[in-house]
Amino acid sequence: MFVRTAGERDLAAVRDLLVETWHATYDDLYGAERVTGITDDWHSLQALRRRLEMPNGEFLVADDGNRIGGMAFADAASDGKSVTLRQLYVRPAFQGRGVGGMLLDEIIESFPEAMLFRLEVEEANAGAIGFYRSQGFEQAGRTANCGAADSGIPALVFERVRG
């Protein structure tokens, strides 16, 4: 598995990965119908394309030459000192193999001026919480609306200071 910058040709495969991963992770929490609605909105080809075009963003995929096994997207504040990790997902079949760590390391390296990295994680997603804690992130707060202003998805806010 190697990590590289995503391109337009990757978007359909990234969408497939996100749909698979979201259903595997969240169907039991929110129901398949709600998860489908979220993925149709948040992970549409149009939404992913907008991320590719963001000037202060980094959109990465983990690729084994045959299949996209993971993806990550982050963007920096205008001063470049803080970065928000918006997405980091690993296909269920590839979880536990170091793919998430590779993606996270590359995101951090992509923003050399950043001192603070921030993310939100659904508070019932114990696997993701454990992963981020193992990567040096600490809980810094909570939000009632993970991912979008009106999502109604409670989340924990985690931060990691470069050092």
Image: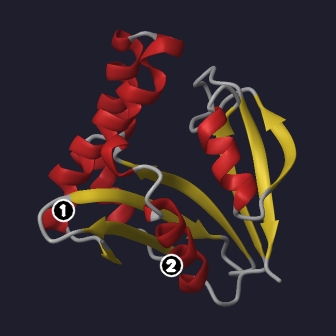
Residue 132 placement, left or right of 38: right
In x, y percent, where is residue 147? 57, 39
Residue 71 placement, left or right of 30: left
- Marks 2/1 in contact by CB < 8 Å: the verdict is no
Does 25 appear above or below 78? above
The picture quadrant where one finds residue 38 is top left
| Residue holding disc 1 | 10
Q: Quadrant of the N terminus?
A: bottom left
Residue at 70% across / 25% down in the picture? 154
Q: Secondary structure at mark 1?
A: helix
In x, y percent, where is residue 144? 74, 26
Does 40 appear above or below 102? above
Identify which amino acid the numbered label 2 is placed on. Glu
In x, y percent, where is residue 22? 40, 32
Q: Residues within 10 Å of mark 2 (few under 14, many from 20)?
A: some
| Residue holding disc 2 | 106
Residue at 29% across / 30% down in the picture? 40
Is residue 24 shown to the viewer in this render? yes
In x, y percent, where is residue 89? 44, 50
Residue at 75% across / 54% down in the picture? 133
Residue at the bottom extreme?
112
Is residue 146 shown to the viewer in this render? no
Identify which amino acid the numbered label 1 is placed on. Asp
